[in-house]
Image: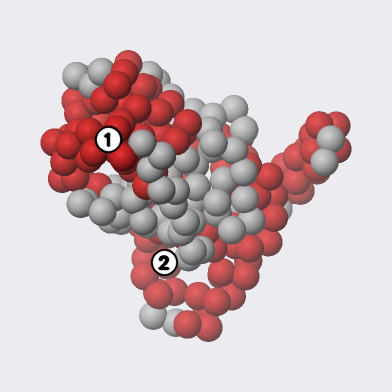
Amino acid sequence: MDKLNFARLALAFLLGLAAAPAVLAQAAAPGGAVPQMTEDKLQELRKDAGSFEKMYRTGRKVADFCSHCHGQSGQSTKTDVPNLAGQNTGYALAQLQKFTDGKRINSFCGPLMKKLSSDEKLAVAIYYTNQEVTSRPATDPAMASRGKAVYEKNCFKCHGTGGYGDEKYARIAGQQPEYLMTSIRRYKEGSAARSDEKMMKQTRSLTEDDMKALVMYIGSLK
């Protein structure tokens, strides 16, 4: 798809969403956390297979647009854009809310998330986080071994020994290398685009070689 047609598609999509009424009214959540009504609805859906499947199908439709960057199956088409497949649903929802609240900054995702209704965000999060995950074998075993040592010192307490995270912390196993490197650098530098006190503390002392090794190791995790 050429840039002009993509831009037209983006505009049409955003205008269509702007005209649609909000599906789920809710109180604002502090700090980019998942609004309680959305969290409650997610828990209800997990107990009702039929409703969950319906929301999943809705998410697939929304993902038709998101797939230009994140891929239809949640495997990113670009190394600087994160994979969403297999991500923890609660964590994914919290990040969508951060884009909505301006706690995470992206010139495309930010405006888009502000146009999506709460149900649409919940649906696309459910769809993507229930896709199969893939990973890449390390191309340099020695570097990956160094990365493992860095990971075990700085990362595993939040993201887990396998990089799976949980509903509060991101699954980073198999994540895109350029995206990982950019995120780590932003935390290290205290960028407004990715501000998190724990991450800033853990990345502050990392050298360039530490970061390269860490990215290779994390990307190889399955």
Tag of residue 42:
2
Tag of residue 107:
none
Residue plotted at (42% across, 67% down) = 41
The residue lying toward the viewer, choosing from 203 and 137, is 137
In this figure, what is the number of numbered marks? 2
Residue plotted at (84% across, 35% down) = 2
Q: Residues within 10 Å of mark 1 (few under 14, many from 20)?
A: few
Residue 195 in the figure: left or right of residue 75: left
Mark 1–mark 2 Cα distance, whole angstroms, equals: 42 Å
Which residue position holds label 1? 142
Is any atom of residue 97 visible in this view? no
Q: Amino acid at mark 1?
A: Ala
Disc 2 secondary structure class: helix
**Quadrant where the N terminus is found in the figure:** top right
Q: Amino acid at mark 2?
A: Leu
Residue plotted at (47% across, 56% down) = 134
Q: Residues within 10 Å of mark 2 (few under 14, many from 20)?
A: many
Vertical position of residue 176 compared to residue 209: above or below: below
Residue 56 drawn at (x, y percent): 56, 69
Q: How is the image coloured?
A: secondary structure
Vertical position of residue 189 compared to residue 5: above or below: above
